[in-house]
Amino acid sequence: MTAADHTGGQGPVETDVVIIGAGPCGLFAVFELGLLDLKCHVVDILGKPGGQCSELYPEKPIYDVPALPVVTGQELTDRLLEQIRPFNPVFHLGERIDALQRQPDERFLLTTDAGKQFLCKVVVIAAGGGSFTPKRPPLDGIEAYEGTSVYYSVRRIEDFRGKDVLIVGGGDSALDWTLNLQPVARSLTLLHRRDEFRGAPHSVNEMRRLVGEGQVRLLIGQVTGLHGEGGMLEGVSVKTAAGEEQLAVNAMLPFFGLTMKLGPIAGWGLNLCENLIPVDTEKFETSEKGIFAIGDINSYPGKLKLILSGFHEAALMAQAAQKIVNPDRKVVFQYTTSSSSLQKKLGVK
């Protein structure tokens, strides 16, 4: 795994490029930019790299990636992460870019929903169909608890130490965080509407082992109400086959899936067309100089929403980005097969 974020609370992070989106196109953009000695920070609202490939179809076979007759979404992600390791990109996961402002020196100031800021010369939007937004459970008054005792992602495991935690859901996210938070929580309950789970078999088996040992409580049912004051959860009402039950919890993590929305990008002053970002086909630059869009989020005549198309777009984008970051530097195009300097960067020579 490449570098994780350790920059909170230290002022704006200065870098050459900020990539918004850690899906396949965003990851390959790191590679193409790295060959040109451009340093990247990658921001994604999801808790791990891979975008839709990892989150929505990690085990689904993909048949149209060149030279790979068949590869799963997670395998493709893992290979891309291995490929970009020599360039040491920094990932900021579980965060969303909420604001983008051009500065007097033509750089961009970007701010995440966690208050982290970046200063860069180039922004690459590789956000797929937009940002993933967690689905909110249909519970009256849940908004009052969001961010204080109801969470849709885990940014710091330590925030849940010593708490009575309720996790709701039956997929990989619910199971993964059940296993990861159990050692630090005072108590942990997993609630799902049925006694069948969609997660990896190993995770299901490990969860059931913890349930059998009494370290995790498993309930089959659904949440019907939240209780507490001042945004602090004190308990929830749960309906099971045995009837209504009250649980004393002070932290709830509902994993009800994700929806795709364009999100804050819509307010950045870019020309939009049907929630897509028009770009040119020379550089894949948007209507704003220095802001590029690659992958499913862009639009141009003849566009095909294929991963391989996004890879092509990333390559051309990187050449244009280099001219913005280093306008006085002359770059000679090189092939990785024959360039000793590129092979040295990749650690193969």
Image: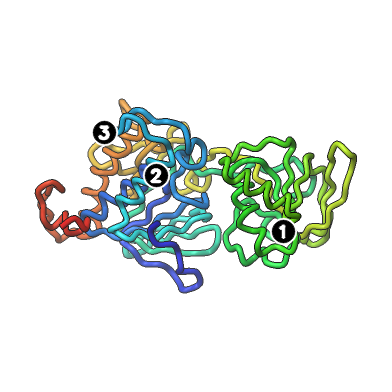
Q: How many marks?
A: 3
Mark 2 or mark 1, earlier in chain: 2
Can residue 51 be seen here? yes
Q: What residue is shown at x 46% (from left), y 68% (from top)? A: 6
Which amino acid does the dot numbered 2 rest on? Thr
Farthest right residue in view: 243
Measure the alpha-carbon separation of dots 2 and 1: 32 Å
Give left or right: position of 257 versus 45: right
Mark 3 or mark 2, earlier in chain: 3
**Quadrant of the rendered structure where residue 284 is?**
top left
Question: What residue does disc 2 label?
Answer: 77
Q: Are marks 2 and 1 in contact (CB under 8 Å)?
A: no
Can residue 98 be seen here? no
> Within 10 angstroms of label 1, few (less than 14), some, or many (20 or more) residues?
many
Which amino acid does the dot numbered 3 rest on? Ala
Closer mark to the observer between disc 2 and disc 1: 2
